[in-house]
Image: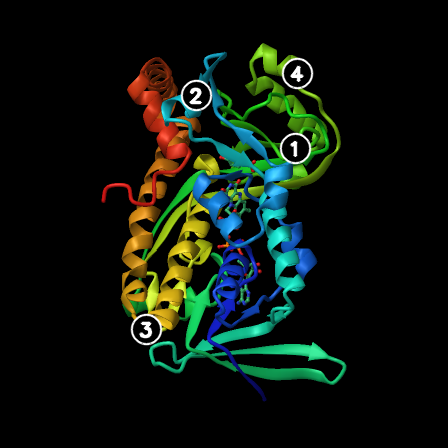
Amino acid sequence: MQIQRTQVAIIGGGPAGLLLGQLLHKAGIEAILIERQSPDYVLSRIRAGVLEQVSMDLLDEAGVGARMHREGLVHGGFDMLFKGERHRIDMQALTGGQQVMVYGQTEVTRDLMDARQAAGLPTIYDAANVTVHDFDTDRPRVRYETTGPNGTEQHEIACDFIAGCDGFHGVCRASVPRSAIREYEKVYPFGWLGVLADTPPVHHELIYVNSPRGFALCSQRSHTRSRYYLQVPLTDKVENWSDEAFWDELRLRLDPAARAQLVTGPSIEKSIAPLRSFVTEPMRFGRMFLAGDAAHIVPPTGAKGLNLAASDVKYLSGAFIEFYRDKTAAGIDAYSERCLRRVWRAERFSWWFTSLMHRFPDNGEIGQKLQEAELDYIVHSEAGSRSVAENYVGLPLNFGE
Ligand code: FAS
Ligand code: PHB
């Protein structure tokens, strides 16, 4: 058994783990990052696309924001399409100037990986059988295996803290005794079929569609790369969808102007993601802290998943910095409550926006009519539009304080 020692053991090399590692490094705090997949596999996952100002600021603070500012697309609004008509939500005007950045999670992850590698920070990829131990004591440990020329090798990391950034299917939350944790979950009766294509976006901003045929979203990654989503039944399989079938169904859910602008092409990625609302309470267990998807999941309608991971990491990195620099546990003790206040607000908006924009099998015809009536109110009410806008750009970190 090879024994290593560090201050923080970060489990998971997605955006949460990488961002935490970068912020701790800049504060002089040692961390070892353990990821079960390869770097290429982590980068191959196509996920989020929209960053709130809080996330942009954090990437700048981590020293990895340059390419985002160079290549990202700043958006001041988005369209809502229903009953064949598009209405723009002018976020910038409704929120006193706030905007969002369209910059894919893949690029965020790549920027963070490059920075970690450039700094020569200890990162274990392809770690197998990762387990966490004694996190209810002040001497937590992480164990994992690697396979090399000498066969399988056992490793152990002794640390002060474990950061569980290992996503929804990770080992950290699963290792907490059931009596010490509460999980809240809502699974939606549909999924999102996503397509990535090297085609110019159909519009310069995003279009969220409520159609009697189901939800659709027209998003983008650059001026030459588009990202589209269609609501599909949970029983659907990605192999049932040819590119042509996808484009035909998307056309049926768009308005004539967008249909005329749509440029189709071969998909370079195509997948179906399930939708759920999920929250773990608390998010701290002794010396182990959950951050990002390890602790919570939102339906992607509100573009909150990646942004919640970033705000968790902001609180957690601050708590660790206070512990080591100021010798106080105040931030650590407040971590879970501070995160959960923001998490539940984002969960509420994501659930509400999902409920408004998707077809629910049990809602019947009146369900569509009631959704259209609510959409009609929102786009014609400054108060209604401002409520959507201020939640979409991200509520301030001190909201309600
Ligand atoms: P991640 O899941 O990204 O990263 C966790 C990492 O931990 C992974 O690399 C995993 O390999 C690793 N890991 C797991 N178990 C481990 C173990 N035992 N040991 C070591 N490592 C382990 N959000 C949006 O805002 N918009 C979207 O459109 C959107 N689409 C999504 C589509 C899908 C299919 C999924 C799953 C999520 C989507 N999300 C979206 C949310 C997504 O962007 C997450 O919020 C974001 O990836 C959160 O980052 P992390 O918390 O780092 O979790
Ligand atoms: C994306 O571009 O992947 C995206 C954008 C906005 C969302 C969800 C996904 O609400």
**Mark whose residue sits in front, 4 or 2:** 2
Question: In terms of secondary structure, where does tag 2 sit?
Answer: loop
CA distance separating discs 4 and 3 = 58 Å
Residue 222: give its label: 1
**Mark whose residue sits in front, 2 or 3:** 3
CA distance separating discs 2 and 3 = 45 Å
Residue 23 in the figure: left or right of residue 379: right
Quadrant hosting residue 113: bottom right
Residue, disc 3: 327
Q: Amino acid at mark 4?
A: Gln
Q: Amino acid at mark 2?
A: Asp
Residue 261: give its label: 4
Tell which circle, 1 or 4, labels the residue nearer the N-terminal end.
Answer: 1
Question: In terms of secondary structure, where does tag 3 sit?
Answer: loop
Q: Amino acid at mark 3?
A: Lys
Q: Nearer the viewer, residue 293 or 195?
A: 293
Quadrant of the frame with the C terminus: top left
Residue, disc 2: 90
Res 176 seen here:
no
Give coordinates of residue 291: x percent, y percent: 42, 58
